[in-house]
Image (cartoon, rainbow, N blue to C red):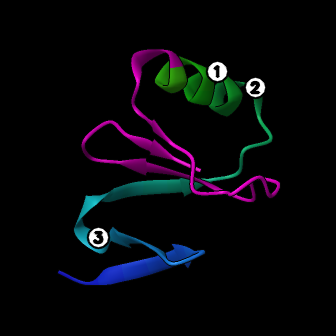
Amino acid sequence: MKLINIGFGNMVSDGKIVSIVSPDSAPIKRLVRDAGDKGMLIDATYGIKTKSVIIASSCHVIL
């Protein structure tokens, strides 16, 4: 297990990452909104513009 730094002191296990995608497309925006509604969204941006969206194997969405 290796931890990957995603910024601002936050880390994600490399074994849990399914994909890393751009937040600009409509399907990804919908995925982020739905994850927020279900309580599965982790916002690690600290108010900075989102540059990528990480989708984890546990169905969590990390900004």
Q: In this view, does 35 lie to the left or right of 8?
A: left
Q: Position of residue 8 (x, y in %)?
A: 60, 75
In three-dimensional space, the C-alpha distance between marks 1 and 2, rounded to whole angstroms, equals 6 Å
- Residue drawn 57% across and 47% down? 43
Q: Which amino acid does label 1 sit on?
A: Arg
Residue 56, image x, y percentages:
35, 49
Spatial CA distance of label 2 from label 3 is 27 Å
Mark 2 Cα-neighbour bin, 10 Å: few <14, some 14–19, many ≥20: few
Q: Give the range drawn in magenta.
A: 37-63
Furthest residue in direction left, as rendered = 1
* Above or below 49: residue 3: below
Mark 3 to mark 1 CA distance (whole Å): 25 Å
* Residue 31 pos. (x, y %): 56, 26
- The residue sitting at 67% across, 57% down in the picture is 45
Give residue 14's position: percent from left, percent from top.
31, 72
The residue at which mark 3 appears reads as 13
Q: In terms of secondary structure, where does tag 3 sit? A: strand
Q: Name the residue under label 1.
A: 30
Residues marked 2 and 3 touching at CB (< 8 Å): no
Give the residue displayed 23% in from the left and 67% down from the top: 15
Residue 24 vertical placement versus 15 (above, below): above
51 in the magenta segment: yes
Which quadrant of the view contains residue 39? top left
Front: mark 2 or 3: 3
In the depicted view, which residue is nearer to us: 3 or 17?
3
Q: What residue type is labelled 3?
A: Ser
Report the residue at 48% width, 80% height from top: 5
Predominant SS along the magenta part: loop
3 or 1: tag closer to the N-terminus: 3
Residue that label 2 marks: 26
Q: Tell me the crowding category of disc 1: few under 14, some 14 to 19, or many 20 or more residues within 10 angstroms, Cα based.
A: few
Q: Residues within 10 Å of mark 3 (few under 14, many from 20)?
A: few
